[in-house]
C-alpha cells in the first residue's frame, strides 16, 4: 500500500461532481471501526464544504441514534425512517438523540434538512444496504491498540467490557459486509507524518 496526503477541499469538490443518489442529496458515509478518527474526518470534510456554494452540510453521528450498546447495527431502520427516507423524498428529517448518561432518547428532535450534501458518520454507515444511496463511501482505519486508547481516554475505563464486545461485533460486521473493499476512499486515521490535519488527510491506495 502507498499513502498520499490529499486535501479535504478537493474531496468536497469531488463529491459535488458526483450524482445525487439520495433524492437530490449527495450522501457521504464515513465508516470504520470505533476510535479510528471518523468523527474528526467528517467534521473536517464538512468544514471544507463550507467554502463551496452548498455551504456546510448536516452531519449525523450514528452513535446518537443507538439505543445503547446492544443496538450496534440494528439502529439502521431508525436512521432510514427518520432521516434517509424523508431526505430522499426532498423533505427534512429529524431524529431523537440518545443520551448515554440517561440511557434514554432525549425528547427534543434534531432536525436534518434536505441539503445538497448529507454526511452520516459512524460504524456501519457505509454498509452494503446503503450502497445505492451513496455518492461517496469512506472507510477510516487505525491500529487497534490506538483505537482502544482513544476510546478509553474519551469515555473512561468503565466502558472497557462493553467496548471489547463492541470491537468484536464491528470486526464481524466488516468481514461479512466487505465494507473496506467497497469503499471509494480508505483513510489512515492515525498518520504519523507531519501535516496540516485540518486541511489534509492521508489517503491509502493500492501500490
Image: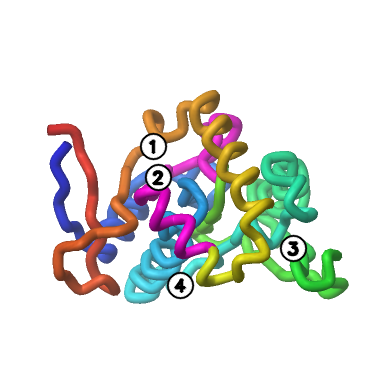
Q: Is residue 152 left or right of residue 138?
A: right
The circle on residue 183 is 1
Marks 2 and 1, how far apart at CA: 6 Å
Q: Is residue 120 left or right of residue 108?
A: left
Report helix, strand or loop for mark 4. loop
Q: Nearer the viewer, mark 2 or mark 4?
A: 2
User: Which colouring convention does the figure follow?
Assistant: rainbow
Q: Which of the two labelled residues, at mark 4 and mark 1, occupies the earlier sequence position?
A: 4
Q: Residue at x 57, y 32 (%)?
A: 173
Asked whether the beta carbons under mark 2 and mark 1 sit within 8 Å of each other, the answer is: yes
Q: Is residue 39 left or right of residue 203?
A: right
Report helix, strand or loop for mark 3. strand
Q: Nearer the viewer, residue 178 or 135?
A: 178
Asked whether the beta carbons under mark 2 and mark 4 sit within 8 Å of each other, the answer is: no
- Give the quadrant of residue 97: bottom right
Q: Nearer the viewer, residue 21 or 126?
A: 126
Residue marked by disc 4? 56
Report helix, strand or loop for mark 1. loop
Q: Residue at x 44, y 69 (%)?
A: 43
Magenta part of the chain: 125-151
Q: Which of the two labelled residues, at mark 2 and mark 1, occupies the earlier sequence position?
A: 2
Asked whether the beta carbons under mark 4 and mark 1 sit within 8 Å of each other, the answer is: no
Residue marked by disc 2? 139
Q: Which of the two labelled residues, at mark 3 and mark 2, occupies the earlier sequence position?
A: 3
- Give the quadrant of residue 50: bottom left
Amino acid at each position: 500500500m502507498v499513502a498520499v496526503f490529499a486535501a479535504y477541499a478537493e474531496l468536497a469538490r469531488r463529491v459535488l461532481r458526483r450524482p445525487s443518489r439520495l433524492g437530490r442529496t449527495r450522501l457521504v458515509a464515513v465508516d470504520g471501526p470505533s476510535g479510528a478518527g471518523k468523527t474528526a474526518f467528517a467534521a473536517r470534510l464538512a468544514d471544507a464544504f463550507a467554502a463551496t456554494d452548498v455551504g456546510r452540510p448536516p452531519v449525523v453521528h450514528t452513535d446518537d441514534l443507538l439505543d445503547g450498546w446492544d443496538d450496534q447495527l440494528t439502529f439502521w431502520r431508525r436512521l432510514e425512517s427518520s432521516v434517509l427516507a424523508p431526505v430522499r423524498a426532498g423533505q427534512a428529517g429529524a431524529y431523537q438523540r440518545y443520551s448515554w448518561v440517561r440511557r434514554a432518547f432525549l425528547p427534543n428532535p434534531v432536525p436534518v434538512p434536505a441539503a445538497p450534501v448529507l454526511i452520516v458518520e459512524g460504524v456501519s454507515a457505509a454498509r452494503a444496504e446503503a450502497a445505492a444511496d451513496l455518492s461517496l463511501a469512506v472507510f477510516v482505519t487505525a491500529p487497534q491498540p490506538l483505537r482502544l486508547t482513544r476510546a478509553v481516554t474519551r469515555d473512561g475505563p468503565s466502558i472497557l467490557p462493553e467496548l471489547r464486545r463492541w470491537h468484536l461485533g464491528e470486526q464481524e460486521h466488516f468481514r461479512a459486509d466487505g465494507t473496506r473493499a467497497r469503499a471509494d476512499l480508505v483513510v489512515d486515521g492515525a498518520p504519523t507524518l507531519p501535516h496540516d490535519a485540518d486541511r489534509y488527510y492521508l489517503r491509502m491506495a493500492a501500490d
